Image (tube, rainbow, N blue to C red):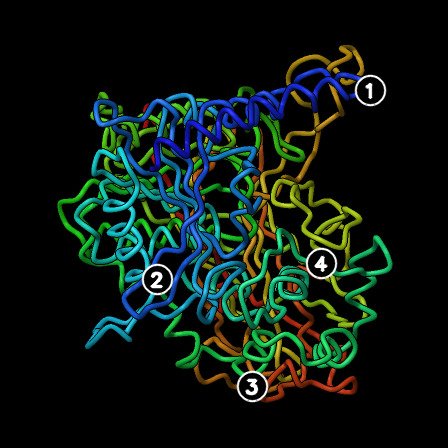
Amino acid sequence: MHLMFRSLTVLVLVALAGPARAQAAKPQQPNAASERADYIRSHYTKFEYRVPTRDGTRLFTSVYIPNDASPNKRYPILLTRTPYTVAPYGQDRYARGLGPTAEYEKQGFIFALQDVRGRNMSEGEFINVRPHLAKKSGPKDIDESTDTYDTIEWLLKNVPDNNGRVGQWGISYPGFYASAGAIDSHPALKAVSPQAPIADWFWDDMHRHGAFNLALSFNFFSGFGKPRPQPIVKESWDRFEHGTPDGYQFFLDLGPLSNADTRHFKGDIAFWKDIVAHPNYDAFWQARNLLPHLKNIKAAVLVVGGWYDTEDLYGPLRTYAAIEKQNPGISNTLIMGPWPHGGWTRGDGSELGDVDFGFRTSALYQELELAFFKHHLKGGDKPELPEALVFETGANRWRRFDTWPPKGVREARLYFQPKGGLSYSAPKAAEESFDEYVSDPSKPVPYTTELTTGWAKNYMTEDQRFASRRPDVLVYQTEPLEKDLTFAGPLEAELWVSTTGTDADWVVKLVDVNPGKMPGPVWGEQEEDKRNRGGQQTLVRGEPFRGRFRDSYSEPKPFKPGEVTKVRFVINDVFHTFERGHRVMIQVQSSWFPFIDRNPQTFVPSIFEAKEEDFVRAFHRVYRSTAHPSSLKVGVLPSVDD
């Protein structure tokens, strides 16, 4: 029956295509996207299923089967589970892309695309980053791992001409479902690729060390968070209308966070209420930490992330590490490239913002990713994948390592010095020494110069001179380097601070400073030179920390005005080379708006309930004395000649 319907569908579509094209007033020139869509329509047949799970809930699943599939030519299943949409809906309407790249469709897979429980056309209740149940006592105990297992089991039995092997992949939220699907792996699940996966929303996406990601959370949940009481064919959600292109001003005019619900959401966004109700790392957030549950994984794993992913950088790094620790002996590879969120499939990766990487960095990755799935699902050649394939920014090259962080990394500390200096030597000033600035919530430091209400995609490589010239940003930098210097692995900020307020945020940024005169042709001599990059302060990594969580993320406490206090926090990994003649710079500030919401600088039980009068100016000090040596701990990877 499947084969008969598939053949009939193809004939009908071919018959309909001719008149539609003939009626077109102006034939359009084909492009890569339209050619890809035409290829899918002519080489695949689409089916729509409602896949039953163990508790009886049915999950809407679109399945695309190659037209030449037969008992003598079987294909593996490549599964993607998403909370967004598997649109378009209807067996006569075809997606314009099925796999990570067009080459997947040409190579041939059975593509299964599924609306997760409670989203779009699937039945059941949707729960954001649904907690994993480590112990299950019956069919009513479900989570994303059981829904994945049940889906795979059903597809194997009901989709014709599959070869009994399944792969799963996804980017961002679908990356979370790929991670969850690998837990207690179905025996047929042979290859999984969580890409930019969510790991724990108190450190990625919605928060950074407990500091609230205002712009992303507001914009995302204003549409995604609207209720869906029953299955509905909806192929997109309504975008929030800010009424201005100036996101900085919009969120400043918003005032205290409590205004978001009263002015805009009108109580309609359930998860926004959850965020407001749980300002600390309590049981609500702890249950949504997937990392401890990444166990009993039998499939080969390819974890992918981007060094310039503003949403999910924590996720891939921690997901790889957790899988490596909790599943000894399995194939587990980490690939980190110089990409923004999803940039490894959505662009060629040759440049980003103020950085030119010199070549199309996505090409090598895309070849290896396809080879990974072909090897495990179709018996293809084993790809040349190391344990860790990571892009070295600054030097702009791929490196292969047996571990990540790599072996041989030497721990060092960069200490803040008088007059904005930065060196490996601890301060020698016996007397108390510090730098001071005024932090004013009414004039927060912007995180970008780009005019946008959404994400400034390029801010993670943006020239930071706009910030370093502000009086509320401290700047420390080394002398010009005499030889190349490579940092690899996580960073750790250790600040000794005081404030006249009772709460504060601390933002630490690692910056690569170009020489004043760059090598090569002078700007303007060659037409392809876009700008003079002399003296450019390129952001390498930035991380905010909500000071109230310095001792515990679950039990915040105020600062005592004027009391010197240590604030220590880990900053996501880097792999960056500061070239000879460059300087290493560290910037310290107390706002990063509207990426991070404003700290009122008056301690209140919940910043989500702060009042207008709680937002006050405060004097902040960062100490650099023998007794209180503020520093950044780095991992230095020795060069070959060392």
Q: Nearer the viewer, mark 3 or mark 2?
A: 2
Locate residue 405 relative to residue 101 in the image: left or right: left
Give the residue type at disc 3.
Pro
Neighbours of disc 1 within 10 Å: few (<14), some (14-19), many (20+): few
> Which residue matches tag 3?
558
- The residue labelled by disc 2 is 144
Q: In the drawing, does residue 555 fall left or right of residue 623?
A: left
Kindly identify the residue that appears in the image at 66 percent across and 40 percent down: 537
Which element is circle 2 on?
A: helix
Q: Nearer the viewer, mark 2 or mark 1?
A: 1
Mark found first going from the N terminus, 3 or 4: 4
Query: Toward the viewer: 508 or 177?
Result: 177
Q: Earlier in the sequence, mark 2 or mark 1?
A: 1
Q: Which sits earlier in the primary sequence, circle 1 or circle 4?
A: 1
Position of residue 450 relative to residue 348, above or below, is: below
Q: Report the amino acid beneath label 1.
A: Ala
